[in-house]
Amino acid sequence: MENNIEHESPLTGEQSLQLITSMISKAKNEFIDTGLSSLLWGSVITFCALVTFANYWLKWPALDYVWFLTIAAVAPQVFIGIREGRERRYKSHEGSLIGGLWIAFAIAIFIFSYVANAYPFSQATSVYLILYSIPTLAIGFGRRFRPMIVGGIACCILAILCTFTPSPYEMLCLAAGAQLAWFIPGLILRKCYLQAKRKHV
Amino acid sequence: MFKDLNPILHSQLRLALVSILITVKEAEFTYLREKTNATAGNLSVQINKLKEAGYIDVIKSFKDNYPQTICKITPQGVQAFEEYVKDLQAYLNIKK
C-alpha cells in the first residue's frame, strides 16, 4: 500500500479501510523503549537490597544509608528521560499514560517510605514488592510485554513469600523482585532497541 | 442512499496521515514521511490541505538548530475521521 501512496489514484472503499488499518497498526507498533530506565532501577534496587542484606553481618553504619542511592538515581533517570524524549519523533497517548503511572508509583513509594520509617512495621518489604508489581503488571499487560507480566507476577509471589521470611532474608526477595520486574525485562528491551537501531542505520 | 465520502480525507496520503495522527498524540514531519513513504514536497502539500481544513495543527519550531514540524490532530479532525469511517462502513455495508 505504501508504495502507491505517492500516486494519487482514486481509492475504493476496501482500499481506504485497508490503508487506515495498516497505518494505525504501523503507528501502534512503533514502540521505542531503550530499556535504560528499567536497567537503572533494577540495578539500584538490587544493589541496595543486597548491601542491606550483607550489612546485617558487616554492621557498617555508613551502609545504613545505602537506600539514599535511590534518591541519587533520580538524576540519571531525568537525564535518560530527556534524552529519550529528544530521540522520539512522536508522542503517543500510551507514553503519557505510562509517564503518569510512574509518577504515581514514585509518589506512592516516597509516601510509603516516609510512613514505614516513621512507624516501622515488619511487613514493609512485602508492601514494597506489591507496589513494584503494580506499574510492572500494568505496563506488561498494556504493551503485551511478557517479561514484565512475569516480573509483576513474581513480585506478587515474592511479596507473599516475604511474610514467611525472617529479616534480613526478605532483602533477597526484594533483590529478586527488582531483577525479575525491571533488570531482566530491561536487558531484553535494550537488546530489542539496539537491534532495531542497527536495522535503521 | 449513500453519503459521499469526505473528499478531504478520501485521498491516499491525507487518509494515511490522519490515520497515523489519530493513533499518536503528535508526530514530527520526518516520522510521518517515514511511515507514509511519501516525498517531502507532496507531504507538505497534503499537510497544508489538512491544516486549511482545520483537521490538523502544525507547530513549527527548532530542535538542535534544525527546523522541526510537528503535526497534531484537532478535535475537528477526530470528528471528521470518525464520520469518514462511519460513512465507509455504511458504504461497505459493515455492521458494527
Image (tube, coloured by chain):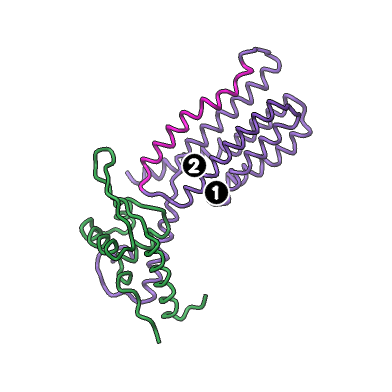
Q: Indicate the position of residue A72 as horizontal and vertical percent values.
A: 51, 25
| Residue name at image x 41 percent, y 67 percent | B79
Element class at badge 1: loop
Are the residues at dot 1 and dot 2 in contact (C-beta closer than 8 Å)?
yes
Q: Quadrant of the N terminus of chain B?
A: bottom left
From the image, tell me which residue sits under label 2.
A189
Q: Which mark is residue A145?
A: 1
Tell me the magenta residue range. Answer: A63-89
Please state which of residues A127 and A181 is positioned toward the viewer in this rendering. A127
Distance between mark 1 and mark 2 Cα atoms? 10 Å
Residue A67 among those drawn in magenta: yes
Question: Could you tell me which chain the residue with mark 2 belongs to?
Answer: A
Q: Is residue A115 left or right of residue A194?
A: right
The kind of residue on which mark 1 rests is Phe
Looking at the picture, which amino acid does disc 2 mark?
A: Leu
Which chain can be seen in purple? A
